[in-house]
């Protein structure tokens, strides 16, 4: 992670805490690895503070299960990047599924996000993410920020409504029982971001957020504010009007989701990120044998989450944090050095 | 436009043709300027072909109407970037609405898109865009590629279904009559793109497409394939299975929208881009006076489209073309020089 | 020019003044065009101040002399990019010499440099450039900053020593009389730059300066401080020792030229930039006909400066100013917005 | 290292071989560490070939000697980045000298260079570097390419002339005996590079080479071809004339050093890189105590090379190789995938 300001207090434990949020301890819902991801900060931190040099962090991917890979060597899994990757890299790609096309690629995003979170704290910006839909089961009622902060990580699906969480869990268990998988939607929020952050033409704030979010495997839709719903409203019902309150400009509504013209408005940034159901399923699917060029059947073996949403929640949060940090550094709100140390 | 391969045959007229598609001649639906946008290629083209140097093209923004700007100097228009821009640039921003926050900023995208289109033709890739929803009026039936190619530009709303287009036009006229505006959805398609194009981690094809599309003013949602709908399907219903047909790998379905793991799959890329209703409306809205810090009422005057979708269609097409061209150059499929000239 | 902070007061005249310094009015030494370069600011400036949007400036290249180009179509001029360009662009390059390989390409550098200079003034950083060697005639004595500021632009060769300038002029006139050309060395200085500016690994301050300077046509060597001479000294004679003076850290010497480890030291940045003699000479030279693949003789016609150093002086100054401005923005010393305007 | 084409055969041993060239086994001249640098390829290589994913390589910096660092905590070493770094990072920088300002930062350049070398071999481009001057002792006679290939690594100073090497070694030993250090000049060569490689305005080939070379600690001058000497020649003596030889365009001379207008000419690229004497010397030097703001004396302890040129030779070679590889990928001469593997 290059470009991190000097003077940020950070330890292995701080990053580990965020990393641990990826894997629900509640079990049953997501796949488990015998050894948990353990992060080491290799460089860029000295006597407990970032030095201004690139921060290198490492998580060893020790618990690799290669046993099932011979089958997929020539049999691309439907929904996976196996086939396009074999075309792009002419067969040199690592087809074992632990590489750049894997959900494992989100681990470094969470690691970088842990630093971003602590930088954002310095300027009182808070990023939250929580599950609002799994397998068609939706959070229908409005959740308070307090509920999102307190309850999101109290269940295995990272949903701030405990009752909805139970129905989501049931839906996942049901699909898993049938060798199938489900998708869902994560809501991301950025609070207390001042107005005017972003770079219109062509690094606008929403564009950069969308870019990083679409780099998360499985994302099929990114919406800001009312999103697709906006297209069905009239201007007079959609525009957020302004008013002066306690000597400050504000809007009673936030349909636009906190960004206009690529700049933050001062209202919360609100993003909905939709994920497709997990690609790897036990159910038999039609595929081809690329060597013999014949149709075949594949049943994907190994450990696979029937739903990636629980693991995706801290990743969405990390991505939003990373992009906001970059932009707050660009506009000079997060300084290049925090405080003052020696001398 | 830097990075355009040498040897592309191009003239002012070629670019002008694409530019003219922005403004429906059918009238009534979009605002008209007394003088049409007229493009001049200033450099980078010699004896009819690109030279490999940056291509500089200019459209003079002559028909500027400043008459109404004094009102908005201190009164930010709801839905516009006026307020966040005034915060970001501390009042130095050009508040007259013709600048980087304006729909005018899409003109250069269409100009660059005109070159991209001709580069894509060299590798048989075709990009299409058409309106599929305005003011809640949707294209419900499946349209053939042939219909999209032939009919999109035969009506003022750029919809390939003539009957739906009429209902869309009626909805726009109705809203405009009430001093209001409407939004809509544009579908973009890229055909005949080979499998394996894109840069996973972190310039994936969908991420780069989303980034440029979200730089178009008014976009609130970008979806690939089934988009948000994907989140509600099971893996077994969503995954696109493979089969061998005439010696080639193909999929009978394309729910994923032509991109997996940031790489093209060889199926058509399909994107839905949702636009909010036009911000500028004649109806009275609440705003504030930034100088006096008091609530006020604003009625936005001047020429404003009650719906920007018709103008957005060629812009979406241009953006998709630009991103695909960049990626096809990166992977070496579009060469840095087309053909051979002298010597 | 993108990334220019909002709130900089700038006019066409300010930029024109810098542009005018490229062409000595003293005559005889450099080629003259019947029409002087005239700059227009097209956008990014509103009511006399930059808006934060990209600043677009235009100089029309009206006085183009194409008469002699047919000869060089297939006959590459020795010392020019004609041959490598024809290989790179397979004959599509604009061979007439007014394009990206021409000295004309330094005009926009001076334009951008004019803005950079005014941004640097805001943080009391001053950039100077002057001629220290032409055709082997060198400035041997130490010049004061005051002399450099006052005298550089009082003669046609931009040399701060009037007596040396006369000998330089004589050397140029002599070479020109023989249909030949000469080279020289320009010294660039940056004063009052605070310590710690730059990005070690891999955008170090000296590296970025060297990169832009080597983009000026004709540069063959870039040296910092004692440059090549450093290689011949011992560490004990080269290292600049520190001392405390009036409560501040300083060095009585500055052999290193103001940059260590890619960071500014607080001492003046001192750079020597050596230019080859002008490529275009009237004297007969051996070349080839690329069409017939035969040896031929070429005598380059048209207007050519027998020495480009006088024009190069403001270009070197502009390049240094641009790079310093970029780095001062990166470290947050030049803010993204200067002052406060409306509201 | 991102952007490495898929399909390159590479092993830990291949990279190790290049890394081993950094440390002369001949002893006496450079500092030695008890444990040699040992590289591990962590990812991006599968079954012996690059996969197209980023290649992550690691060298543990195990043999760190912190014992002497307390002294320099507040006492910046003359010639080192200690002082500017403490200003930039306000005391948070790692002052122990093993970080981004250290010669250790050239290790990853050599690692990346090892891959670059093998990519260049695929297109028959060869990069060489050798010492041409140390402590004023110069290689005066012309060396053949064969001598440079065979003899450079047969002595501790990496000089292709055995007799000159002996005198260089003697000069180093003499300076070291006095607690002092010396500098020198490395020549880099790139052979068999086709004409037309580079990106004029503003990523020209010489500019990009200079930028990376100036990122090597201690470089004070970069020259192409005759370099500074060019400034003293007339155009008629400097220009490289063209002639047709065996049906190909060539030049009997190469004063320009293989690059014109930012593009390769087809002649060998020739670069001279001058290094200052090593900063760390045992001799007493004046410095300041930053805490007490008083003048002090420092004698730098620890292991320090009295001359860094021997270690710099493979680094210069690596840097040239990296930049050429990047540019050959940009112009499409090195393809994104080498050959074809499975399927």
Image (cartoon, coloured by chain):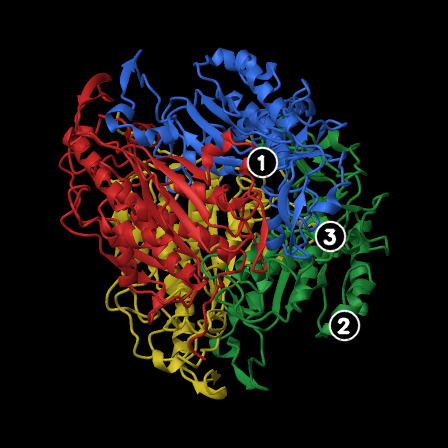
Chain colours: A yellow, B green, C blue, D red
Relative vertical location of residue C89 with respect to residue B90 in this rendering, above or below = below
Q: Position of residue B231 (x, y in %)?
A: 51, 68
Q: How far apart in space, not on screen, are marks 1 and 3 (Cα)?
A: 62 Å
Q: Is residue C40 above or below residue C149?
A: below
Check disc 2 and report its element: helix, strand or loop: helix
Q: Determine if marks 1 and 3 fall on one subunit.
A: no
Label 2 lies in what chain?
B
**Could you tell me if residue B43 is visible in this image?**
no
Q: Nearer the viewer, mark 1 or mark 3?
A: 1
Residue on which disc 2 sits: B147
| Element at label 1 | helix
| Residue at numbered disc 1 | D236
Mark 2 against mark 3, which lies toward the viewer? 2
Dots 2 and 3 on the same chain: yes
Local SS, label 3: loop
The chain to which mark 3 is attached is B
| Whether label 2 touches label 3, CB < 8 Å | no
The residue sitting at 69% across, 60% down in the picture is B117
Q: Which mark is residue B308?
A: 3
Front position in the image: D19 or B226: D19
Mark 1 near mark 3, Cβ–Cβ under 8 Å?
no
Seen at 46% across and 32% down, the residue is: D228
Identify the image quadrant of residue D85.
top left
Nearer the camera: disc 2 or disc 1: 1
Image coordinates of residue D8 in percent, x first then y, are 39, 66
Q: Quadrant of residue C30?
A: top right
Dot 2, crowdedness within 10 Å: few (<14), some or many (≥20)?
Answer: some
| Residue in the image at 57% along x and 34% along y | D235
Same subunit under labels 2 and 1? no
| Disc 2/disc 1 C-alpha distance (Å) | 66 Å
């Amino acid at each position: 992670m290059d470009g991190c300001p000097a003077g940020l207090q950070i330890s292995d434990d701080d990053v580990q805490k965020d990393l641990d949020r990826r894997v629900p301890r509640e079990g049953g819902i997501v796949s488990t690895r015998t050894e948990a991801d353990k992060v080491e900060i290799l460089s860029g931190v000295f006597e407990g503070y970032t030095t201004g040099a690139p921060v290198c962090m490492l998580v060893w991917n020790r618990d690799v299960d290669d046993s099932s890979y011979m089958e997929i060597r020539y049999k691309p899994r439907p929904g996976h990047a196996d086939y396009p990757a074999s075309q792009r890299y002419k067969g040199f790609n690592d087809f074992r599924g632990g590489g750049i096309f894997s959900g494992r690629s989100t681990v470094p995003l969470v690691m970088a996000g842990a630093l971003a979170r602590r930088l954002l704290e310095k300027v009182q910006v808070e990023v939250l993410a929580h599950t609002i839909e799994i397998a068609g089961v939706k959070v229908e009622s409005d959740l308070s920020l307090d509920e999102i902060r307190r309850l999101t990580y109290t269940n295995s699906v990272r949903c701030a409504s405990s009752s909805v969480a139970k129905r989501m869990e049931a839906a996942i268990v049901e699909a898993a029982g049938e060798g199938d998988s489900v998708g869902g939607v994560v809501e991301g929020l950025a609070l207390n971001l001042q107005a005017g952050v972003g770079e219109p033409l062509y690094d606008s704030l929403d564009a950069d957020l969308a870019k990083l979010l679409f780099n998360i495997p499985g994302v099929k839709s990114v919406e800001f504010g009312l999103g697709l719903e906006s297209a069905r409203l009239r201007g007079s019902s959609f525009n957020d009007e302004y008013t002066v309150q306690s000597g400050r400009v504000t809007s009673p509504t936030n349909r636009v989701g906190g960004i206009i013209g690529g700049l933050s408005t001062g209202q919360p940034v609100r993003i909905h990120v939709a994920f497709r159901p997990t690609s790897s399923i036990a159910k038999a699917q039609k595929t081809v044998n690329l060597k013999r060029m014949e149709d075949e059947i594949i049943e994907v073996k190994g450990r696979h989450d029937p739903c990636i949403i629980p693991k995706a929640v801290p990743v969405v949060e990390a991505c939003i944090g990373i992009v906001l940090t970059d932009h707050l550094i660009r506009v000079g709100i997060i300084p290049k050095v925090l405080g003052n140390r020696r001398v």
